[in-house]
Image: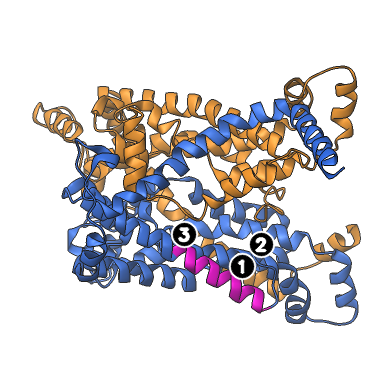
Chain colours: A blue, B orange
Amino acid sequence: MAKMTNQVHKRSLWRTILQYKYFYIMVLPLLAWYAIFSYAPMYGVTLAFKTFDYREGILGSPWIGLEHFRTMMTDLELRRAFFNTIMISLVKLVTHFPTPIILAIVLYEFSRVVARRVFQTILTFPHFISWVVLSGIIVNLMSRDGIMNQLIVMFGGEAISPLVDENSFRPILYITHIWREIGWDSIIYLAALAGINPELYEAAEMDGANRFKRLLHIAWPGIKSTVAILLILHVGQLMSQGASFDQIFNLYSSPVYSVADTIDTFIYRTSFTTGGDFGYTTAVGIMKSFISLVLLVVANTIVKKLGEEGLY
Amino acid sequence: MDAVLKKKRKKWKLFDIVAYIVLGLLTIITFFPFYNVLIVSFASFDAISKSDLYILPKSFDLSAYKLILSDMKFWSSLRNSVIVTVVGVAFSMTLSVAGAYALSKKGMPGRNGMLTLILFTMFFNGGLIPFYLVVKELGLVNNILVMIIPAGLNTFYLIIMKNYFSTIPESLEESAKLDGANDMYILLKIILPISAPFIATFGLFYAVERWNEWWYALIFISDSSKVPLQIYLRETLITSNSLLNSMAMDMATQGNSAKVYTPALQMATIVITCVPIIAVYPFLQKHFNKGIMVGSIKG
């Protein structure tokens, strides 16, 4: 009997699959893309335990065990890149993360419809411009004869070059990151705020709740879960997107490597400019991916412990 | 709701005034750099050197633009960017729409496994070098397709599209199915027409991504006839495009009316690069304001 039901079950599964055959055809190219460009490279991580030989390829390169991981421990340039990545990401998290939330709340409470549209249009625009272009704009603003130095000189100061100064390079990263993303990032919170039942607001107003109380008891609970999810995602990206390669690579130069070089720029330079062992930079990449995954899991666990819904 | 709006329109409250000032300042600060790019791109050498503070447009000089338009390399990189954008959007949208639609079918055996595999790639990857070697193995180095195929999918967009398709009532599909239409036909003739504005928005998002593409070119393309506009711009800005500069020098030494101001040249290249984005921006904004992202982060 059991065997028979099993067979019936198998046959009905097969029938369902046939029923969905066109959907499988539709999803196939997508799965092939992920197999080739996301999963095939994951096999390539074996390179981290090999020394790369161009002629032999990944498969033929000789194994060297944990050699690269030992080298990583004593690589001072990598250590610097590691701490820079953490520092830049963490400060960005602290300085940038709250800004779109605040902006969304202010925009939501702001009752001038036309002005709000104008503000939002301009504040969101820089997100769609590449870092190549934005850094061109920043370099021009801050150049010797750029508008910033024209102003400084006019007020009797001395011209400065903040982009090649170790003290000012990072603050420029933080500020320009907000410049590019504040408007765009606020959209998701605005959407969450728009989902709040307006009757709640009316009722609160009738009960005499002031703006701050409404914020605390209606707006904040309404966006809390969105904040939690985005926070997890940000923490998961501390090692990668947190210290944006695009932004730093287009703005930095050798005088500020000491404060600007991150793991991503280190991997790029070591692999393609200074001709380092591909095996070594693969090992560095793995370490990065692994730490990111751990951070994501930890952040998710903490958020869940705090009573919010996590990412998974 | 109307009552709320009416009440809100009544008069200026203190909060509105403060918010107006703060938001206004933020907006001006955000906008000013772009304004500066525009006026510098039209600045003549004389106008710049004569003024201590160049904050108002004092000249309308097109020589920087003329110089760029006479550079063959500009035209080849523009051509490459146009190809990458047009073909790239077609490629990305075909894969994303078909895939997202299929993945929105909850009854499909294996669907959850597929989704897990796709989502996992958002949080873990093999890293730059293994990826580089795979792409190299496929013969995509120094090939313009590298900016179209490996760059072609955005998992985040895919998930949003999947969530959107799963909100379309199935009754729409069922009647067509009774008439004997297959699922692909249904997607093309029924689903796509009703989701046109939504699909178009993601087409634009992909278009902006492809137009802004520079990373794949940085890593995989060294042949200067194959670089996109962003890399052309990067060369003009950072390593300073030697050809353009020498052309500017030539004009100056030949006693041509005016010297071209180098920053004007750089800013004019930026303006040209941004024009397509500015052109599609109103359409982009129309849709993302409607809360396209609602419920999008959780798959």
Task: Report x, y in % for residue B149.
Answer: 45, 31
Looking at the rendered image, the quarter that the C terminus of chain A falls into is: bottom right
The residue to which callout 1 is attached is: A101
Amino acid type of the residue tagged 2 in the rendering: Tyr
Per the rendered image, the range of residues in magenta is A292-306
Amino acid type of the residue tagged 1 in the rendering: Ile
Q: What residue sits 44% from the left and 30% below the top?
A: B148
Label 1 is found on which chain of the structure?
A
Q: Is residue A134 magenta?
A: no
Q: Nearer the viewer, residue B17 or B170?
A: B170
Q: Is residue B208 above or below residue A115?
A: above
Q: What residue sits 75% from the left and 30% below the top?
A: A20
Q: Are marks 2 and 1 in contact (CB under 8 Å)?
A: yes
Query: Does the rendering let one see residue A69?
Result: yes
Q: What residue sits 26% from the left and 73% below the top?
A: A167
Numbered badge on residue A189: 2
Q: Is residue A132 above or below residue A291?
A: above
Determine if marks 2 and 1 fall on one subunit. yes
| Element type at mark 1 | helix
For residue B89, side relative to residue B47 (left or right): right
As drawn, which residue projects farthest toward the top? Answer: B180
